[in-house]
Image (spheres, helix red, strand yellow):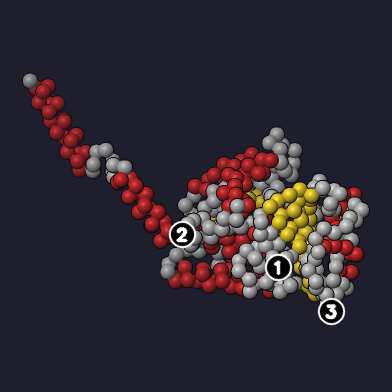
Amino acid sequence: ISVFFGKKYQPLLLQRTNRMSTEAGTKVDAGAIAKPFREEIQRKVKELKELGIEAPLLVGLLANDDPAALKYAEWTGRACQADGLRYELRKIDDPINVEQALRDANNDVRVHGVIVYYPIFGAVPSYSGSSRDDYLRDTVSHEVDVEGLCHYYRSNLYQNIRYVDTPRCEKKCVLPCTALSVVKILESIEQAYDNSKPIGKRMEGKVVTVVNRSEIVGRPLAAMLANDGANVFSVDIESIYCFEGGSGRLRKCSEEDENLEACVRKSDIVVTGVPVKGYRIPIEWIQPGTVVVNVASFKNVDETELLKIPGVVYAPMVGKVTVAMLERNLMRLFENFHHPEIRKKKLGYETTKLIENGDTGRPWYGSLIQLYTAVAVTSLIALTMMKR
C-alpha cells in the first residue's frame, strides 16, 4: 500500500479553494454531531408508544469473530437500548447458514430492519469467495435494509434517485450508514458544506479525496459527495477515479495525470479509510484549512502533527455518528414500509387488486356454513340412492 500511495508527486490539475487560517487545527466531537439525531429518534419512539405502537425492531446477524464487527454489534445494541429501539442479535455458528437466517428475517413481519455484520465469507477461505458477501448484501430486502447496501439502494444512489416513491417523492431512500455519517460530519463544518445553496450544489467547487473504494464506505461516499456538487477523487491500491460534481461524469485518471499525493495536496477535504495499522498519509501533503475525516479503525494520519497545521479540522472517528445514522435508517424504513397505517394501506391496495382481477380472496366453498350444508345434502342424496 505504501508503495502505491508514495508515488512521485505530479503537477496539480485542479486548484483547491483559497482558504487560509492562522489558527491551530481543531478536532470534531462525533458525539455532539450524533446527539440531535439520536434525540429525534427518542422523540419518535415516544410518540409511537403513546399511540400504542411498539418501537421498531432491528435484527443483527453475526457470523464471525472480527473485532470491528463485534464492537459495531455492541455499540448498536447499547445505542438502541438507550434510545428506546428494540434490538435482537442473532449469532450464527456456520456462515453457510447466514443466507437462510437473512431470508427468515426478510419474511418476518415483526422485523423492521436487518444489519449483517461483515466480513463473513471474506474473512476465511471459502468456496464462495469474498463475492459471497456481496451476494448477501443484495439478498437483504430493501424494506429492511438498514445499511442501504442492497442493489436497489446502491442503484438509486449512483443514479442520484433520492426517493423510493417517485414521482410522489414523499419517502426518502436510506443511504449507507458509514458513508452517510461522513456526510453529516461534513455538513456540520462550515468550510466543507454551504447549506445556503440548494441541494445538489452545497459542495460545489470543493475538491475531495477519498482513500478507500469499498462498497460499504468509499464507493457510495464518493457518489454522495459528487451528488452534492464536489469533484471527488476515489483512490484505492490499484487506481484513481474522478467523480465530477454536477455533470455526474466518472473518469479513470492515468498515472501520468494523478497520484495520491497530487490529489491530497489539492483537496479541501480528505477522507481516509485504509485498514492497515501502519499506514499514514504524510503530513506535508495536508494543506492549511483542510478537513480530514478518518473512517478507518486505525488512524491513517499522525493526529498530533496534523493539528499543528493552521485551520485544519479533524474528525478522528465516525462510529458514534454511524450508529446514529443506523437508527435513523431504521426509523425511516419503519415509516416507509412498516408503520401500521402503511400496512393498512398496502393491505387495502392488495385486496382491491384481487377484486379487480376477479378474486375476492375468499375460499372456493364460500363459508363453513355453506360447506357444511353442501356436505349434508350430498350425504342425504347418497343415502337415498343406496336405499333404492
Residue at horizontal 12%, vertical 28%? 381
Name the residue that disc number 1 marks.
186
Q: What residue sits right under mark 2 in the picture? A: 168
Q: CA distance from mark 3 to mark 1?
A: 19 Å
Of the pair 36 and 367, the residue shown nearer to us: 36
Q: Hey, which residue is sitting farthest left in the picture?
A: 388
- Which element is circle 2 on? loop
Residue on which disc 3 sits = 23
Extreme residue toward the right, this view: 8
Q: Is residue 44 above or below residue 241?
A: below
**Along the line of sight, the residue nearer the viewer: 306 or 120:** 306
Question: Residue 341: which quarter of the image?
Answer: bottom left
Q: Position of residue 53 (x, y in %)?
A: 45, 65
Q: Where is the C terminus found, in terms of image quarters?
A: top left
SS of the residue under disc 1: helix
Q: Secondary structure at mark 3?
A: loop
Q: How far apart are the two marked residues, 2 and 3, measured between alpha carbons? A: 47 Å
Q: Is residue 197 visible?
A: yes
Q: Find residue 158 and report its horizontal and vertical position in percent.
A: 63, 52
Kind of residue indicated by mark 3? Glu
* Residue neighbourhood size for the residue with mark 3, other residues' Cα within 10 Å, grouped as few (<14), some (14–19), many (≥20): some
Disc 1 vs disc 2: which is toward the camera? 2
